[in-house]
Amino acid sequence: MVSFGILFAIQSLTAETLGFTIANFSSDIIKLYYMAIGTSNNFTAADAAVQTLLPYLSIASLVGFLLASLTFAPIVSWLGYKKTGLVGAAGSVIFNVLLCIPFNVYYWMVMRLFAGFFVVLFQQPSIIIVGEHAESSKRGLLGVMFQFNVTLGILVASLVLLAIRTYQDKYNAWWVNFVVTFIWPLMGFVLLFFVPDVKPREEKEISPMLLFKEKKYLKVLILSVMLGLNQQCTGINAVIVYATETFKDTFKTSGGGVHPLSSVFGSIIINGVNFVATLGALAFIEKLGRKILLFGGVGICFVAQVALMINYILAKSNTALLITASIFFIIGFEIGPGPIFFVFASELFPVEAKSLLSSILLSFNYIPNIFVVVLFPILTKAAAWSPFVTYLIVMGITTAVLLFTTPETKGKTQEEIQMILTGSAPAASSEAEKGSEVRFGSGVMTAE
């Protein structure tokens, strides 16, 4: 049996890599890069220059995420989970090093795409390997710790940004963001050598068409699509990616002018709450169950999105309402759809379809993510409140579907979970999980 410490470390390092990859490309860093390559002479000029390419630079890594998720299954079939993870970790290091070279913005965009591609090849096999070797009682904790470390990485990246911005007039150290990023996959590359690969099974990976032909796979396919859409259509990455833009005029100096670090202060507040809120999920993941946290968190996100929409409908934005609603939105996300997505990713899939369903899950996580990030500034220009209407509609639809299709997996083994999903036999419940039984397809599940 692999020690919990090693599994925890690998899970944490993959999460830190993802967190830094999400946060190390803020609009402020892009502006500093424009200054480094000579496109703009100062930060104010760069602010105007970046607007044209900002959405596309912001989604470069997301496109890489998507390409990796679409090719994940054949790559794993060829290399296996462990070797795929090693290739991903090595690629993450190499392309973050290449991101430190100030060449031109299009070169940077391509390097960013490849960095995103290899992050997923490092992340997803590692999650599956950890899920396979972890005790069932620890899987929920490890899943939440993944999201915890993603948020920690995002927060630390914001603090690195604060240091870079504070001393930018003396030295433009934009590249430090990427140096700090490649530390995590480098350590992960080393640790993966100490973990055995997922053992090959007699069952061969099923063909994609079988997902649509057999009812037991179709249930999990629907869950995969809905979980991916539900998490990203909350609009979380628009909030994180554009935090520096959203708050760039919010904080004032004692003289009443806009503080030069206003954007960074807003980013730190959002990402700090993002980090702290995950602690709540850590406390409750094995006590309340996955479903309660998922739907409770989505409910908080829904209310917060309504408040944000109202703020932008007002003739003048209310700073207190903007900050409060943003904070509660982050809390709701980190209690529910944020961590539970990763827990379900390691628990729900049958072994003979794990890599294929993982690819689908990630694809329907990244496709809406790309649209959210690209459309946010476009919709905001049309009407500042319009993005939130879109989020509310999609979030409502996907939540309704998940409410009737998602099983509770807390405390259950992989075999018991598959019994619930396939309806082949009722899953044995522990004393702590016994409660009223409700139907799930042709099987039985325990209502928490």
Image (spheres, grey):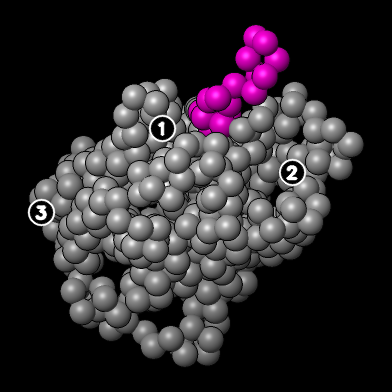
Of the image marks 3 and 1, the number of the one nearer the N terminus: 1
Give the side of residue 268 with respect to residue 325, left or right.
left
Q: Which residues are magenta?
A: 251-268
Label located before the other in sequence (3 or 2)? 3
What's the distance in space between the residues labelled 2 and 1, CA to CA?
27 Å
- Residue designated by label 3: 193
300 in relation to 283, above or below: below
In the image, which is nearer the foreground, mark 3 or mark 1? 1
Residue at the (51%, 44%) spot, across then down = 46
Q: Quadrant of residue 109?
A: bottom left
Q: Which label is found at residue 73?
A: none
Q: Which mark is residue 305?
A: 2
Which mark identifies residue 161?
A: 1
Expressed as whole percent of the image width and height from the top left, the position of residue 256 reads: 70, 15
Which is nearer the eye, 392 or 211? 392
Q: Amino acid at mark 1?
A: Leu
From the viewer's side, name the closer residue of 29 and 403: 29
> Hey, what amino acid is under mark 2?
Gln
Q: Residues within 10 Å of mark 2 (few under 14, many from 20)?
A: many
Residue 286 in view in this figure: no
Residue at figure coordinates x 60%, y 40% from the top left: 245
In the displayed structure, would residue 290 be above or below residue 440?
above
Query: Magenta stretch containing residue 8, yes or no?
Result: no
The residue lying toward the viewer, choosing from 144 and 163, is 163
